[in-house]
Amino acid sequence: MLDLRGRLVENEPMAGHVSWRAGGSAARAYFPADLADLAEFLRRLRPDEPLLCVGLGSNLLVRDGGFDGTLVFSHGALNALRREPDGTLYVEAGVASPKVARFAASLDLVGAEFLAGIPGTFGGALAMNAGCHGGETWPLVDRVLMLNRRGQPIERRPDEFAIGYRHVGLRRMTDEIFAAAWLRLAEGDGGAARARIAELLDKRLASQPLDLPNAGSVFRNPPGDHAARLIEVAGLKGLAAGAARVSEKHANFIVNPGGAASAGEIESLIGRVQAEVRQRFGVELLREVRIVGEQA
């Protein structure tokens, strides 16, 4: 049996690991050294242990009562990013999505520019088919590397997954997690790609409340419409629950100024927005952000 080289911490506060800067603690948190170390950790993990992979915490809220299981942190560990001999890009799950966009452009590969507008890691982008500005993650994917709960690596093709809008799942039940992917991108004008990335970053800075703790878009866009439009028309910009409030800059963002809001206040505000939009327009807004753990 190999020695573990990562770091295992008990009762790890999650407010420092999620972009909302709120929430309870994880019973156990593991910070692997690399992909091989993560595989060894999974081999040792109790089969029924609740497990959740976390990247940059940009799409996650842990309730104030905490998460009674193990969180695995990929960022800073699963960080390999390279071009393979077959021309694909190998991207591990902990690489920040904007870094993938810049790396591809530096190689005169095009099609990944939209990833510059996604604040999380590529593992999260795979798990939810993240997208923006007309692009989505999975059309780029040639194949993925999964790890199961026994630490065994498994390569899978896109046709083994049910892929939809902000949703990805294997077509049969499994206990696997995303570890890496190989992307197939077209050759093109790297300078134009870099210019497009700069344009998208400027647009993001101008339209989103990046100066305040937030988790990106809270709700998925309903078919044929935009969640932000519905929330704004309902007059909910600035609506607050405790220290959490709907952003005045972008209605599909909930901000936590100064990190003063509890996870409970953020979740309560999410529910109030859903209820108001449902009552006004008959539209059920589905969360894009993931909420885990127990109420305090």
Image: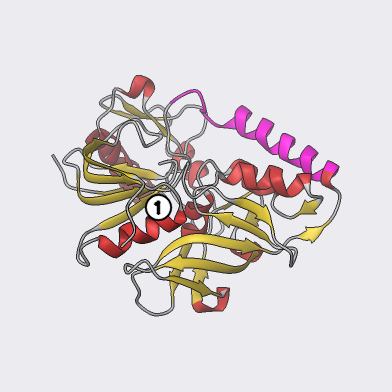
Q: Specify the farthest residue to the left.
A: 296
Query: Based on the displayed image, in which of its 4 quarters is residue 52 positioned?
Result: bottom left
**Image position, residue 293 (x, y; %):** 22, 48
Q: Specify the farthest residue to the top.
A: 258
Q: Is residue 195 one of those drawn in magenta? A: yes
Task: Tell which of 294 and 79 is nearer to you.
Answer: 79
Q: Is residue 73 above or below residue 174?
A: above
Task: Tell which of 228 and 180 is nearer to you.
Answer: 180
Q: Main secondary structure of the magenta part?
A: helix
For the point 69% across and 52% down, the residue is 112
Quadrant including the C terminus: top left
**Image position, residue 170 (x, y; %):** 43, 74
Task: Tell which of 124 and 20 is nearer to you.
Answer: 124
Specify the color scheme. secondary structure
Q: Is residue 140 visible?
A: yes
CA neighbours of label 1 inside 10 A, class few (<14), some (14 to 19), many (20+): many
Q: Is residue 9 one of those drawn in magenta? A: no
Q: Is residue 111 above or below residue 236?
A: below
Range of residues picked out in magenta: 191-212
Quadrant including the N terminus: bottom left
Q: Is residue 143 above or below residue 250?
A: below
Q: Mark 1 falls on what kind of element? A: loop
Where is mark 1, residue-wise? 285
Q: Is residue 279 visible?
A: no
For the point 52% across and 62% down, the residue is 165
Q: Does 206 sit left or right of 74 as displayed? A: right
Q: Is residue 164 above or below residue 206?
A: below
**Image position, residue 126 (x, y; %):** 51, 59
Q: Amino acid at mark 1?
A: Leu
